[in-house]
Image (tube, grey):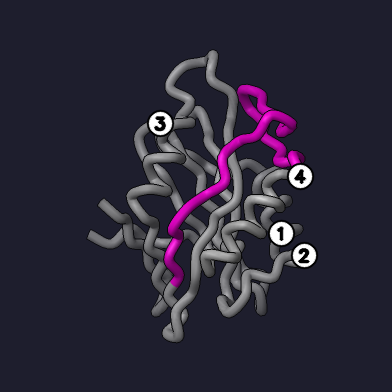
Amino acid sequence: MDLKYSLNETYLIISEKAIKKMDGYKQINNNIPEGGGLLLGRTDISGNTYIVDITEPLSKDIRKQYFFKRIDKRHIELLKIANQRCLYFKGNWHTHSQAYPVPSWLDKKSWKTAMRKSKPGESVYIFFIIVGINRLRVWAGNMETEEINEMRLQF
């Protein structure tokens, strides 16, 4: 089942496929390092964004129990391939070993950097997902104001 999140009049819909892939990296015990990657999707004319797929952790990425850094250049290659299917960069995701994930100061710092450097196409927002053990949480970074706010899950 897809998940739908909102912030003001903006919606983010995450496909079941993307959710299942991210769930495969949940840190359900101490032996599992953080994972992460890119969010791939499209934004419609109303400003609603659909996350259709993700990139997954790759061999050259740095993965530790409390740290993930995406450095493998194949993420960009995968993004270029996704572009051919009209899927574009929409943000980043990673895991935390918390049931209810809370962004660290390092997460917030990297989100601000991503907002300054990214071009998520037709969207005003760039999205950040943290996958926890029991729940995933979503934040939207406004590219114009540089404000970051948590999105609400719609039932």
Q: Which mark is residue 73?
A: 4
- Label 3 element class: loop
Q: Nearer the viewer, mark 1 or mark 4?
A: 4
Residue 114 picture quarter? bottom right
Q: What residue is pinned by disc 1? A: 114
- Of the pair 94 and 60, the residue shown nearer to us: 60
Q: Earlier in the sequence, mark 1 or mark 4?
A: 4
Residue appearing at x 60%, y 65% in the figure: 83
Q: Determine if the magenta segment contains residue 84.
A: no
Residue 130 position, x and y percent, is 51, 44
Where, quadrant-wise, is the C terminus in this rendering? bottom left
Q: Earlier in the sequence, mark 4 or mark 3?
A: 4
Spatial separation of the CA atoms under disc 2 and disc 3: 30 Å
Spatial separation of the CA atoms under disc 1 and disc 2: 5 Å
Q: What residue is pinned by disc 3? A: 133
Q: What residue is pinned by disc 2? A: 117
